[in-house]
Amino acid sequence: MRGRSRWMPLIQAILIANAVLVLAPMVFMGLSAFKTTREIFQHPLGLPAVWSLDNFSRVWVEARFARYIQNSVLVTGASLALILTFGAMAGYALGRFRFRGNDFLYLYFLSGLMLPIRLAIIPLFIQMRNLNLLDTLWSLILIYAASGLPSAIFILTGFFRTLPADLDSAARIDGAGEWTIFARVMLPLVRPALVIVTVYNLIPIWNDFFFPLVFIQSDHLKTLPLGMTAFFGQYYTDWATLFAGLTLAAIPVVALYVVLSQHFIRGLTAGAVKG
Amino acid sequence: MARVYLEQVSKKFGVVTAVNDVTLEIPDRQFTVLVGPSGCGKTTALRLIAGLEEATAGNIFIGDRLVNDVAPKDRDIAMVFQNYALYPHMSVYDNMAFGLRLRRYPRTEIDRRVKEAAGMLGIEMLLDRKPKQLSGGQRQRVALGRAIVREPQVFLMDEPLSNLDAKLRVQTRAEIKKLQARLQTTTIYVTHDQVEAMTMGDRIVVMRDGLVQQVDSPLNLYEKPSNLFVAGFIGSPAMNFVEATLAPRNGALVVDCGSFAIEMPPDLAAIAKDWTGKPVVFGIRPEDIQDVAFARDPNPAWVLPAMVEVHEPLGSDVILYLSTGPTTIVARVDAHSSARMGQPAEVVLDMRKMHLFETETHKAII
């Protein structure tokens, strides 16, 4: 106890410094969203002279913001749905059934964790072209789902393995078929793992700039990060509107993170202590 | 209600034979206990009946129906597991109702059955709770309730009391027995605890290494064990075994244990006379050995002088570890016995209750 309390002030100082470091850019982003571009350069750290919502209305109207956000929600939502559905099903099979090739299949999925998918951009581009999926949201959804699956399977298989075997027997005797055991008995018990997988994949997909840049050309199919580039001009960048757009883009993710964080933390510690 | 019949059933896991050619009839409405040391195949036998394992050979009947290829859910059985296997994310009510809902029982019928079972088990006030919020004993009851509401033909119970503390175990033991008597459902109960087996079973099946050793009522198992293993397994402290030979002396037959020899009663001697001169194993239960001072008209021919090595007072009686030469025997004598550690004592063996086993086959002679 004594040893711990002696280091407490130092530990807290480090944590607070870290929090400031992480939060400061977001605060500046939020504040700048209310300023004019001129003001941003004149008083970069100050509060806005007038709390104006002009930037927000401009981003909404000029930059087809609503359209971008719709695309982003669609792509992120569909990718997550695919990752969770197939990740849970594969994890269940790998974690609970003994069959020939189980270990091989598990390692095969895990090998996906080691492949940097961006290196495969040229073959992916050719494949998408051959599938006639270039310049569609499907190209993004399929790639995100595929690249998210290895980690999802890794996490979920581990969780399914920890569930007691008798639970399966009990449900079987109670009259549950294979699907009912999966959906109504096992799946609810790995909810913390599903939250982890969601949070783990949500932010990279939502923020991804690379794949939309390569695969999307039509303006009406752009996702938020790509859409925001409209404000970067060759000679002039509309910083004020850009910050307003980024602030709006961050809000849904931050909100979701706050809602899920409790489950997230519970999920991270769930495997550690047998309850 | 239904009888359960196993016909030459075997189960192999790779090279290990867990259940070896077992033929067993479990009568309708009775409480049958499968007992044996761990790894004897009793749990596997239960899981075979449940349909959770598939028999390698043989036939299993529930009622008159051959159920080899029938799924667990269609066997009309309910099972209680050692770790309860309650659904952690469902309330007590939902845990009990789950099986009925899957079978599409009408809502009112489900409600009636769950409430009735909860009343029977005294868990009405827990129906809205999650298993996590219950004590071990309460979880145990919910697990029983989940089996009861199904109103199955057969209850299968896999060591349901082994996770409870000693006091609660004794209490729940009596309650399960009462419940079974009331519901009259054929029950197959697996345990490694011979006391649990003796107190609960109408009939006991003793198993070892996948083989059925003896099937009998608790009293018969105790009084007439069919082999050395059953004799040693049932009863606590365990029966004394001494290697001996039968020798004729003065017209009677004596059990010669080397360090001591004791005369057999004439009726038992008549049965055992063919083994005269051959090596046998002599068995006698600790409770059939009494301090001479407390024995009712002791037969002087059965008195044995010995040294008391260990003296364990239990309150109700005293356990003595007695040595006669190289042989140690355990006796359970009257609490007021004056025997003390390191002192000589005289005990009398009740030879009418002696046992004799063949040395090679371990089969009972008497």
Image (cartoon, rainbow, N blue to C red):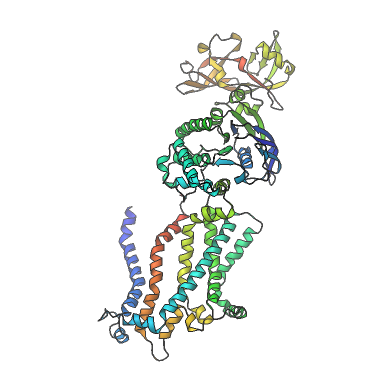
Q: Is residue A165 above or below residue A221?
A: above
The quarter of the picture where residue A47 lies is bottom left
Q: Nearer the viewer, residue A110 or B276?
A: A110
Give percent across and percent down for residue A121. Answer: 57, 78
Give percent across and percent down for residue B101. Answer: 52, 48
Q: Residue furthest bottom?
A: A235
The reply to whether residue A60 is in sight is: yes
Give percent across and percent down for residue A230. Answer: 43, 85
In the displayed structure, does residue A59 sit left or right of residue A189? left
The quarter of the picture where residue A106 lies is bottom right
Give percent across and percent down for residue B341. Answer: 49, 20
In the displayed structure, does residue B311 sit left or right of residue A11? right
Residue occupying image coordinates x 44% and y 79%: A67
Q: Nearer the viewer, residue B296 or A178?
A: A178
Residue occupying image coordinates x 50% and y 20%: B342
Q: Nearer the viewer, residue A220 or A242?
A: A220
| Number of numbered discs visible in the structure rendering | 0
Q: Is residue A60 above or below residue B320?
A: below
Q: Nearer the viewer, residue B46 or A9?
A: B46
In the displayed structure, does residue A140 sit left or right of residue A30? right
Q: Is residue A126 above or below residue B93?
A: below
Q: Is residue A253 above or below residue B21?
A: below
Residue occupying image coordinates x 53% and y 68%: A148
Q: Residue furthest left?
A: A49
The reply to whether residue A224 is in sight is: no
